[in-house]
Amino acid sequence: MTPQIISPDSSFRLSRMHNEMKRQGITDYKLWPFVHIANKPRRTAINRAHKAIVEWAALEGLPEVTILEDDVWFPADDGWKYYLENKPKEPFDLYLGGITRGKVENGKTARYTGQFCYTISERFYDRFLGVNDDLDIDGAMSGLGTFYVCDPMACFTYWGWSGNTQSTT
């Protein structure tokens, strides 16, 4: 599986992301640019960046695509492998590597925050792409599908600057 990564605005984040991919043994990945939209909130740009990858996956006819944000962090050296090995066997809409907020019951969540590592199934592409561009993409997913969370979580985000809130996390 070739992860699709939304690339950073800064050389520091880019370097850190390359180091994390190397540490996880991920050598085949594609970088996607951040989307900059004049006179729109940053969350709109983040929303559109995620959707650009899903649109591409749909056009390519991919059965699923995995998206990582540039600040993803796997605490364990084999975290990526663990994430892949624990992908649900049951049909899912989203499979999340970790979340920052949300209640996980029996490996599922209906509402969450934190969409920094996830696999999206083609059965969910249209619904995902139909979410209002002006909403936080992860918050907008609430109640829209079957969402599994890797349990225990395989990854988190590095502490630092949040593009969404334009502040330190």
Image: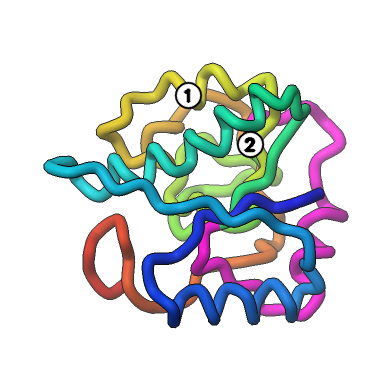
In the drawing, does residue 1 fall left or right of residue 13?
A: right
Whether 13 is among the magenta residues is no
Few, some or many C-alpha atoms within 10 Å of disc 1 (few <14, some 14-19, many ≥20)? some
What's the residue at 69%, 30% (across, down)? 121
Residue at 29 percent across and 35 percent down: it is 135
User: Which circle, 2 or 1, is nearer the viewer?
Assistant: 1
Mark number, residue 154: none
For this rendering, which residue is in front, 96 or 7?
7
* Residue 76 in picture, x, y percent from top left: 73, 78
Mark drawn on residue 94: 2
The answer, for residue 96, to whether it is visible in the render is no
- 134 over 58 or under it: above or below: below
- The amino acid beneath tag 2 is Leu
Mark 1: amino acid: Leu
Where disc 1 sits, the SS reads helix
Q: Does the stretch in magenta take in 80?
A: yes
Region in magenta: 69-93
Alpha-carbon neighbours of circle 2 within 10 Å: few (<14), some, or many (≥20)? many
Residue at the (33%, 41%) spot, across then down: 136
What is the quadrant of the C terminus in the image?
A: bottom left
Disc 2 or 1, which lies upstream in sequence? 2
Number of dots carrying numbers: 2
Mark 2, secondary structure of its residue: strand
CB contact under 8 Å: marks 2 and 1: no
Q: Main secondary structure of the magenta part?
A: loop
- Can you give x and y, in whole percent of width and height, for residue 129 in the image? 48, 24
Residue under the point 54% across and 80% down: 15
Q: Is residue 139 visible?
A: yes
Residue picked out by circle 1: 129
> CA–CA distance between discs 2 and 1?
13 Å
In screen coordinates, is 19 left or right of 169? right
Of 5 and 105, nearer the camera is 5
